Amino acid sequence: MEQIISMNLLAVALLIGLGALSTGIGFALLGGKFLEGVARQPELGPQLQVRMFIVAGLLDAIPMIGVGIAMLLLFANPFITQ
């Protein structure tokens, strides 16, 4: 029983931590490519900005789903019977 709880806490930590890390890397790559695109063709700046914000919203949804699953595992774990 204690091993299930400890593995559960490890899974929650990995879900939240790796989700935040990967989102940070994704935003850095997205911002860099956006700046490269605007530097090459400044007239396409508004179109690129709209697309960047759409992708940023989709990129931001991934850690939110991970946090939701982590909270499910933390507070209402289906693997632990009481």
Image: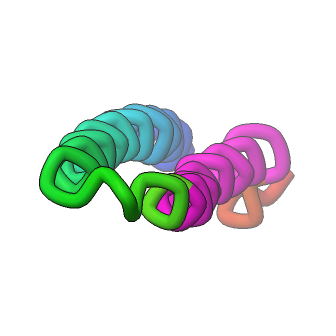
Instruction: From the viewer's side, name the closer residue of 65 and 75.
Output: 65
- For residue 7, above or below residue 53: above
Residue 56 within the magenta-colored segment of the rendering: yes
* Quarter of the rendering containing residue 48: bottom left
Residue 74, horizontal then vertical, whole percent: 70, 40
**Residue 44 falls left or right of residue 8:** left
What main secondary structure does the magenta stretch of the protein show? Answer: helix
Q: Which residue is drawn at 22% across and 57% down?
A: 37
| Colour pattern | rainbow
Residue 23, horizontal then vertical, whole percent: 39, 44
- For residue 44, above or below residue 68: below
**Quadrant occupied by the N terminus:** top right
The answer to whether residue 22 is visible is no
Residue 65, horizontal then vertical, whole percent: 66, 58
- For residue 56, above or below residue 44: above
Residue 18 within the magenta-colored segment of the rendering: no
**Residue 68 falls left or right of residue 6:** right
**Residue 31 falls left or right of residue 8:** left
Which residues lie in the magenta part? 50-76
